[in-house]
Amino acid sequence: MAAYLLGYDIGSSSVKAALVDAQTGRLVASATSPDQEMKILSPQADWGEQNPEDWWQEVIRATERLKNAHPFAGDDVLAIGIAYQMHGLVVVDKNFEVLRPAIIWCDSRAVSIGQQALRDLGETYCLGDLLNSPGNFTASKLKWVKEHEPDVYAKIHKIMLPGDYIAFRLSGEAQTTASGLSEGILWDFKENQLATHLLDYFGIDASLVSDVVPTFGFQASVSSQAASLLGLKAGTPITYRAGDQPNNAFSLNVLRAGEVAATAGTSGVIYGITQETSFDREGRINTFVHVNSQPTDPHLGVLACVNGTGILNSWLRRLVGNLPYEALNQLAAQAPIGAANLLFYPFGNGAERILGNKNPGANLKNLSLTTHQIEHVLRAAQEGIVFALTMGLHIMESVGVTAQVVRAGQANMFLSPVFREAFVNTTGATLELYNTDGAQGAARGAGIGVGVYSSFDEAFASLERVSLTEPQPQLQAAYTEAFDRWHSKLQLTEFTNAY
């Protein structure tokens, strides 16, 4: 009898499902839905919303496509794991009906609420206990609903993160994790519990928060209704859940202090593991509970994020007539390092944390109508994303998180030779790419949670490094010069503390 592990990755662009052979740990099949990126609703400038029902429908379609790619019976699935877009807010009533569209990760409406909370509660509590400014995260978004949509707020029975909502649709159980609460700035690291002091300040009843379950281990079972829709077996256990960036690190077996992961998909992220309670006093990077953290053996993930990564790349693709991304990468490679002095700033997709929660908008500087061609623009965009990530990495270094080797999945912008070359020669880190993704990581996490694997090492025995890119001394000087030029032009007054 076949035995599989099923992983879902709930993104803001698409939902991916992966089927992993439980015995070998190898990918059997994967599927993504929809074919085009899911829409992000923007009722006002700097808002970002999605309908949670759309995520669920894409879970159904992705599962159907997975079965078409590799037919399997519901009895064959031993456990399910879920990865999901972080920092979102889903609110449901007592009948568990969604009350409004989810406020997702790139939405900036609650920035001022988080900043006021930092001023009122003080750095000692926010940075010492929460390890973060309340910022533009889930707790602040819920306060925004309370202030601006009181009729909606009055009906809220439970709040959920996007992955919590999908787990609810699978099981009928409203649950969350400590790691998830930390990403919403709802976790007190000193007390190792829900951040009740912050909730009291916001006037939010702690009963709105779902029950906390372990990241690994039995959480809930697939309901008969969900089983019927998905072609799974009722009672199949859900045994793993994590936000996309902690899960990306987990997918790459980044679990120990000093290890670093990266991704460059919808957002660009560098995520390093530490066992120290690190924080940046200006809130430009964030610290979360990592998936393998235990009260007696804490592991924290320190994260630097660039929101305007995937949206810039997809905008350029549309601009040039929807050429394949591979063709864009080939064009970018035709321009020289530094893109003939053309500078692209990949901001404008909501408030950027590395810029102190400001949104300057995307900028293209030094454009020469007689010199620059599309290949210069494409290269400047890829370099600009790398340079912004390098800014984030330098902030991380200031709190003791360094990157000598960075692991990433062989996907998204890391498929571009220009991006890889710029990344290693600007950051100075060696880049290792692996044959994995978030959905595979979620499946392996489910395997640990259900007891198929007795250790993390066993779960990742089949993980394969597919490429290694090292810095080249003959190129580093040119990239350092290009980075310095890019950074020197980031002269907006409000960003003077950004780096």
Image (cartoon, rainbow, N blue to C red):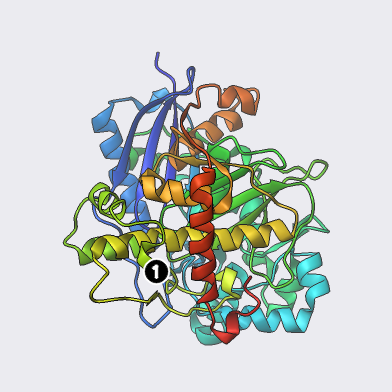
Name the secondary structure under disc 1: helix
The image position of residue 171, as x and y in percent, is 48, 45
Where does the image place residue 368, in percent across and percent down from the top left? 29, 76
Q: Who is closer to the viewer here, 54 or 237?
A: 54
Q: Residue furthest front?
A: 474
Residue that appears at 47% across and 65% down: 307
Quarter of the image where the C terminus is located: bottom right
Is residue 210 visible in the rendered image? The answer is no
**Amino acid at circle 1:** Asn
Q: Residues within 10 Å of mark 1 (few under 14, many from 20)?
A: some
Quarter holding the N terminus?
A: top left
> Which residue: 61% across, 55% down?
180
Residue 314 as seen in the image, left or right of residue 397: left
The answer to whether 167 is drawn above or below residue 315 in the figure is above
The answer to whether residue 105 is above or below residue 406 is below
Residue extending farthest to the left is 321
Depth order, front residue of 496/449: 496
Left or right side of 60 for 198: right
Residue 331 on image: x %, y % = 25, 53
Which residue is disc 1 drawn over? 341
**Vertical position of residue 134 compared to residue 274: above or below:** below
Residue 369 visible in the picture: yes
Horizontal side of 236 relative to 128 (left or right) equals left
Question: Residue 125 location in percent, x, y?
Answer: 81, 71
Q: Nearer the viewer, residue 253 or 372?
A: 372
Q: Quadrant of residue 118?
A: bottom right
Q: Could you tell me which residue is drawn at 19 percent across and 54 percent down? A: 323
Note whether 121 is above or below 75 in the view shown: below
Residue nearest the viewer, comparing 191 with 357? 357
